Amino acid sequence: MTISRRNLFKAGIAAGAALSIPSILRAQASPTDEQTVRMVIDNLSAFDPVVSSADATWTHATAIYDTLFAVDSNFAPKPQMVGKWDVSDDKKTYTFELRDGLEWHDDTLVTAADCVASVRRWAATSPGGQLLMTRTKDISKKDDKTFTITLTKPLGVLLDILAFQGPFIMREKDASLPPTEQVTANIGSGPFKFNQALARPGASFTYDRNEQYVPRKEPSDGLAGGKIAKVDRVIWDIGLYGDKQTAIAALQAGEIDFLWSPPLDLLPVIESDPNLELQVLDKMGSDMFMRINCLQPPFNNVKARQALLHLVDQEAMLHAAYGDPKYCRTVISMFGNETPISNDENTGWFKKGGNPEKAIQLFKEAGYAGEKVVILQPTDWGESSNACQLLAATLQKIGVDAELAPSDWGGLVARRANKGRVEEGGWSIFITNEPEVILGSVISDVTLPMNGEKAWFGWPQNEEYEALRLKWADVETLEERKALARKMQRIWWDYVPQVLVGQAFGPIARSKALTGLIGAPGLVPMWNMQKAKS
């Protein structure tokens, strides 16, 4: 074999990894169970999808819980736990009957009472659920398998709301907890069971095939259809998430099968390995953005938020975050580049290279008086971490007292819920991303409401905008939605609840032996995947 710089680099990574791979991974990897899939996805620190909207939480929930409806590959709503449903002539009463064969992992039957409690708890925090409750007269059990939702006013998008980021169904006793209190039992009715005995927080979590699960008869299609677990066990490795070089070495050595978001500068290493493959699961990509705390100084002043809009150089931020421009591009619409409602309304702020002079002027008009700006930096997510460092340096360059607050993603998720001042453990900015397809779902996307205390982290509030957003449920044609989206975007970029960094199309890396992966925005469904025998 001819020794090239690339092969030498690969050998160096593998040699270093052999020394640094945690002992728990080495123990799991030898011997290898042919029907066990080992995945490095994200840092799973919150397990309740009502309490946290983190992608890791929702991947966990998708494995162990089931849903009333689900979206297919065209994002159309399809029944999942529901066997039959109908709507009254006046379009105000929906009746749902559960399909046969639904059992909890503790071997008790799923009932309509579980569904009622789950819908109510989910609706307290979900934008779609909050809209549903504004038009709901009653949600009640009819019998053990049937429940109804009675409305005060027709809601044509009801099934879409239940299917697109709708409620994960939990046991009634779990769903009876307040939406601010995390459910920790991890007992669902989905295709995989959470193995509590093998849970190793900070290291790994294990999911076993639910032998009692009865999938739908329809073929798997997006998140809809038959959820067939084709492997016996999935081990979610947490310990390797913050060390991508070691994770790639483990992937090459066959000790893991799947790596979420490999560093772009190491993609050539993966591409050159005949046993590995890169795959873009989410064809529309994700939009990275800076979420701003609108409650605390200095960004409780709209001029300071507008200053950030002018300060950001998207191309520089994307280069810091992702490196290779092949996988990213700039974006100016709050609805992304690819959705049917993307538009250019009120986007005159965008300028190649940013506009630092305008930012300085706006900070001065905001009365900025040297308040500390705390940027939450997730050290185990390289792209966001790099973007945070550049943002801090850019703010410091124009005289803003910016400070990084490094932690893993789990720490960031915990801290971003703090509404207090930075001196009290609060925050000013964090950088995250959202699958672009979700940005086109105005009713369901958690980042789009501006309803104050009920809004997503940052808690923006604008009544005029909210009135427009809630009209979305009643407009029917694409042209009406486009017109409404332009009005919303005009207010959005005046208020500035967040600032765009750019759009990215990052691939996952996997063993060629692992096939059948479902492309879903921000999620890694565990069913349908299969692993070829070695």
Image (spheres, helix red, strand yellow):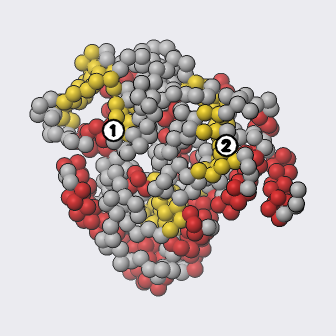
Please tell me which residue is depicted at 38% across the width and 55% down the height of the picture.
439
- In the picture, the disc for residue 445 is none
- Left or right, 476 with respect to 358, comes to left
**Amino acid at circle 1:** Pro
The front one of 358 and 361 is 358
Query: What residue occupies the far left of the structure in this picture?
Result: 90
Place of residue 52 in the rendered image (x, y in percent of width and height, measured from the top left): 47, 43
Q: Is residue 425 visible?
A: yes
Q: Which amino acid type corresponds to the residue marked 2 in the rendered image? A: Lys
Residue 348 percent coordinates (x, y):
36, 78
Question: Where 501 falls versus 378 (above or below)?
Answer: below
At horizontal 27% and vertical 15% (from top left) the residue drawn is 143
User: Is 411 left, or right, of 180 in this rendering?
Assistant: right
For residue 323, above or below residue 398? above
Q: Nearer the viewer, mark 2 or mark 1?
A: 2
Image quarter of residue 392: bottom right
Q: Secondary structure at mark 2?
A: loop
Name the residue beneath numbered marker 1. Answer: 77
- Quarter-wise, where is residue 37 in the image? top right
Q: Residue at x 15, y 35 (%)?
A: 91
Q: Which residue is mark 2?
A: 512
